[in-house]
Image: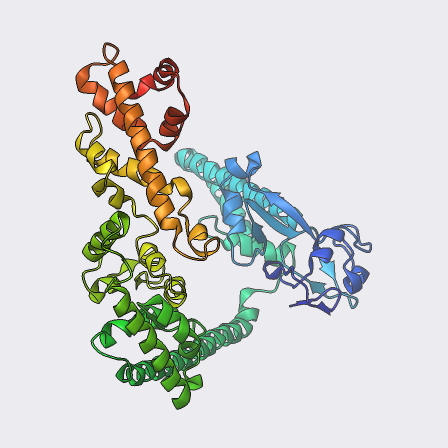
Amino acid sequence: KRCEFRLTSGTNHVRPGLGVFACWNCVVSGKQGRWNRGYSRNSGSSSSIKLTKAWKTSWVRYRKNPIYRTIMSYSRVASNEYGTNHYFWSEHRCDASGERVGPLVTWGDVDDLKGYYDKLKTAAAAKEAEATAAISTAASTTASNVAAADNGNDNEEEEEAAPSLSNDEWIEYYLTKNLNAPPKENYAEFNETFTNTVQMADRISREREELKKSKRDDKMQTKVDKVEKMLETLKVLINEPFRERAMKAYGKEKYLKSGMSSNQCMFLETPFINAWLAPYIKSPSKMTKKAMKEMAEKINVEIERIEKLLEMDFLSDDDDFESAAKIFFRECYPDVEALYTCHSSYHGPTNMMTEEFVTLIQGGRFFGALCYLQANNLSPILLVTEPSASLVQASKYLDETSLKKLAKIAWNQTNTSSRALFQDREDDSWAAEAFAAGHKFFGEAMAKIDKFGAWLEGKVDEDKRAGFLNNIVMSFWYFDDFMKEEDFEKIWTNNSRLVRS
């Protein structure tokens, strides 16, 4: 992009609709460098006003006179549209040699064209009225008047015919006669050459883009083929029976459609394997025979550990908590196949066997690894072990959903979050602490709910009392306030609206 006024390149503001390329400084400052030596049509002096002037379509004269739209849409009336405005050159300009430069029509010419149109329209209406009057008086016209009329007609024939208003002929006539614009025919050769050049440039651009896309697609397909071959070779080295599941990949079709060759072309459903293989999937050439053998051994070691994990021999049958946990985990993961059950993610299907999960196993924290698979939530164990199990059976008000919600709140009393599981603990002793604290909180909450339920007799109908208490438990904020507040009257005042829920 090159400014034709200052002869500078690198400009960000170009106005090709004005007939020249001009930088923003030239458009708004009125200091157009070498073309300042030209002369204004109106003043005849050196021009230093702004290069362009806005013609606003919000003006009343534009809205009430459709002819302005006809003028501005004409092919030889050049302006730069921005928003609701048309920007014209503010005046006619010449270069140092006196030759006219820029568009044919300037800001002031727009109104001049409108005035010329009105003049032609008035003249045409007057001529039509004169012809109508002549026809009405034709019967009484004398021979001498006829002769005079014939002489008058001869004179009219000698006059140049006015341009037609039914098409754009009158605009072309004005440009030729008033602005000394060359006729369209003079541009025929240039226009043909220009059109052919633009079409050729578009065709070459399309061909280049198609060739570029074809090369990119071939490159991406070659990469996919190499990765598939690498994974097939690696798969043979993985131990059965979970060879297929551990090495199952997806995302090839999405990658080929994306057109982004730098992206990872495939993902493995098992996250820790995907993380280990990601550098080789991005650059398959890095996977040497030695690297492949080491990778297969690394994966096999972890698969064996995972298989032993599900035997759950580290959980004691003599401890109430560990015994209940063993039953719970075995129901969740009856075999290794259950570990590969996928859920949806941003990239696609995946399971919970992440690098964090593997880190826990490698550190000997088998219970923490199983808990990680359950999103650190072992609250269902509270509901089937004493003393909470008896309270569940004896519950007068809470339904199954509310009991599960209450158990989850109780389980989280000792902060069983992901951070606590990985960073703040050296072993899995936290689980027994959470189990004991959970039973304690669950018992306290159930006792308070039963007590409050009895207090509500006479205030809430029996058929609505259970619903009211369930609503309190299901809302974290209401339940938190409920456990902190000792005054039942205040609890009722603050939460009575839940009766209508």
Residue at 31% x, 77% y: name it.
300
Q: Is residue 272 left or right of residue 79?
A: left
In which image quadrant can residue 288 be found? bottom left
Q: Residue 399: x, y in percent? A: 20, 31
Q: In this view, does 455 lie to the left or right of 168?
A: left
Residue at 32% x, 70% y: name it.
268
Task: Please count the marks in the image.
Answer: 0
Q: In this view, does 359 lie above or below 485?
A: below
Residue 60 in view here: yes
| Residue placed most toward the observer, 236 or 209 | 236
Q: In this view, does 229 lie to the left or right of 82?
A: left
| Residue placed most toward the observer, 356 or 281 | 356
Q: Residue 56: x, y in percent? A: 59, 42
Q: Residue 53: x, y in percent? A: 67, 48
| Residue placed most toward the observer, 131 or 340 | 340
Viewport quadrant of the N terminus: bottom right
* Residue at the farthest top position: 458
| Residue placed most toward the observer, 7 or 418 | 418
* Residue at the farthest front position: 318
In which image quadrant can residue 12 be found? bottom right
Residue 148 in view here: no
Q: Is residue 458 above or below residue 252?
A: above
Viewport quadrant of the C terminus: top left
